[in-house]
Amino acid sequence: MKKLFLLAFVMIACVLSSGAQKIKGSDTLLPLSQKEAEKYMDKDQSSSVTVTGGGSGVGISALIEGTTDIAQSSRKIKFEEKQKISESGKSVKEVIVAYDALAVIVNRDNPVTNLTREQLEGIFTGKITNWKEVGGNDVKIVPYSRETSSGTYEFFKESVLKNRNYKSGILSMPATGAIVQSVSQTKGAIGYIGLAYLNNADVKAVHVSYDAGATFTAPSVSSAKDGSYPIVRPLYYYYITSQEKSVRPFIDYVLSPEGQATVSEIGFITL
């Protein structure tokens, strides 16, 4: 009788744990994954999805180490990261779950509203140090960046800085929310964030030009969708192929019309 009870207990525990999922990585994706997980668990009461941030690099490292089921990332997986997975006898799958417009933000009291890619490059590489150099007041520019483990840090460097190095001693923030707070409290500050985080009245997004100042466009869902806003990137989920059966139901939900409606609700761009 005791053996039967123990067997039944083990079987129930296996069923309950089979629906448990861990998602880790990109802070940009954090609000989306959290909301998707919440709605998914409402639909499937037996499921359990926990979501944590830390940065894209942290999420992919956790995937390599086997401590997360899904790595959420705002950049593509690197060759050396794929190689580590391959060396362990595994393979990885990539799924684009949404798109994001990267907003460049300044303090609301800053009169500057337009910046070219070249000016942004100058600011974040340290060549431009005062707002008067780009049509603003005689105020020192204080640029804020994400830290190096962030996919947003890498995408901004690739797209905006054209792979040039950030200025020495740039103020690196551990999370997107910290950049918003810092820019809101510093008159000369500038930073970059995912569009979904553009919800603080004390900061404003500048219009950006990638055609040397011929046209300037504000970041929005519509300008990202029609291609007029230039700083747009895909957002990814990565998982180990052998785990597909367990992770795919949640991913398929995110890709479904209901899941993509949440993408719009949070402020990202649907597929």
Image (cartoon, helix red, strand yellow):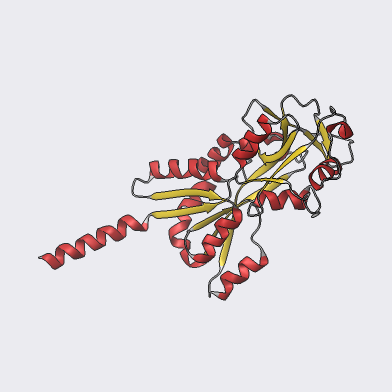
Residue 130 versus residue 25: which sits nearer the camera?
Answer: 130
Whether residue 69 is situated above or below residue 171 in the rendered picture: below
Compared across the picture, whether 108 is left or right of 64 comes to right
Compared across the picture, whether 186 is left or right of 161 comes to left
Asked where in the image residue 171 lies, by quadrant, the reply is top right
Residue 176 versus residue 38: which sits nearer the camera?
Answer: 176
For the question of whether residue 103 can be seen, the reply is no
For the question of whether residue 93 can be seen, the reply is yes
Q: Residue at horizontal 57%, vertical 46%?
A: 29
| Residue 60, position as x, y percentages in the image | 57, 59
Q: Residue at horizontal 60%, vertical 54%?
A: 56
| Residue 188, position as x, y percentages in the image | 76, 32
| Residue 268, position as x, y percentages in the image | 62, 40
Quadrant of the rendering where the N terminus is positioned: bottom left
Whether residue 100 is situated above or below residue 1 in the rendered picture: above
Q: Residue at horizontal 58%, vertical 46%?
A: 27
Residue 67 versus residue 223: which sits nearer the camera?
Answer: 67
Asked where in the image residue 270 lies, by quadrant, the reply is top right
